[in-house]
C-alpha cells in the first residue's frame, strides 16, 4: 500500500536489493511508480541526497515512500539513512 499511495519510492541499501526491499522495487515497477535505489556502499551522504533531490524534482514527488532493510538485517542502515534524509530535507524549500 505504501507504494500505491505514494508518488514514488526511494529504497536504501548497503549493496544489492534483497528480500522485502527487492519486492518493494518490483512492486514499484508493477505499479509503474517512480523508484530510486540508493546503494550507500557506492554513494556518499552528499551524493545520495543530491541524487534524491534531483529525482524528486524530475518526477514531481510530493508524497515519498522510503524503504530499505530492517535494522535487524542491516544494523548500520538507520544512521546512514537518517544522515541522508537530514541533508536532503535541509536543502528542500517549501
Image: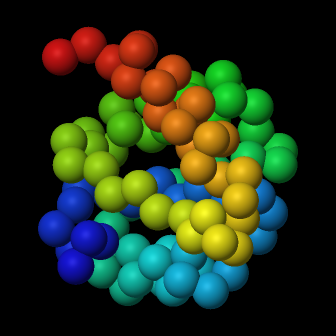
Residue 51 in sight here? no
Q: Nearer the viewer, residue 46 or 36?
A: 46
The image shows residue 2, relative to residue 38, as above or below, that is below
Coloring scheme used: rainbow
| Left or right: 14 in relation to 12 | right
Quadrant of image for the N terminus: bottom left
Which residue sits at x=55%, y=64%? 68
x then y, percent, for residue 54: 47, 31
x then y, percent, for residue 36: 52, 55
x then y, percent, for residue 79: 62, 41
Q: Nearer the viewer, residue 35 or 24?
A: 24
Which residue sits at x=22%, y=61%? 6
Which residue sits at x=41%, y=14%? 91
| Left or right: 46 in relation to 21 | right
The image shows residue 68, relative to residue 4, as above or below, that is above
Quadrant of image for the C terminus: top left
The image shows residue 80, relative to residue 26, as above or below, that is above
Quarter location, residue 70: bottom right
Marker count (numbered): 0
Quarter location, residue 8: bottom left
Residue 3 in sight here? yes
| Left or right: 71 in relation to 59 | right
x then y, percent, for residue 34: 38, 60
Amino acid at each position: 500500500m505504501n507504494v500505491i499511495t505514494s508518488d514514488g519510492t526511494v529504497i536504501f541499501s548497503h549493496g544489492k536489493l534483497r528480500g522485502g526491499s527487492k519486492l518493494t522495487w518490483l512492486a514499484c515497477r508493477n505499479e509503474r511508480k517512480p523508484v530510486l535505489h540508493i546503494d550507500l556502499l557506492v554513494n556518499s551522504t552528499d551524493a545520495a541526497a543530491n541524487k534524491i533531490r534531483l529525482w524528486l524534482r524530475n518526477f514531481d514527488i510530493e508524497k515519498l515512500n522510503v524503504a530499505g532493510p530492517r535494522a535487524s538485517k542491516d544494523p548500520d542502515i538507520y544512521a546512514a539513512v537518517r544522515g541522508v534524509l537530514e541533508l536532503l530535507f535541509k536543502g528542500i524549500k517549501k
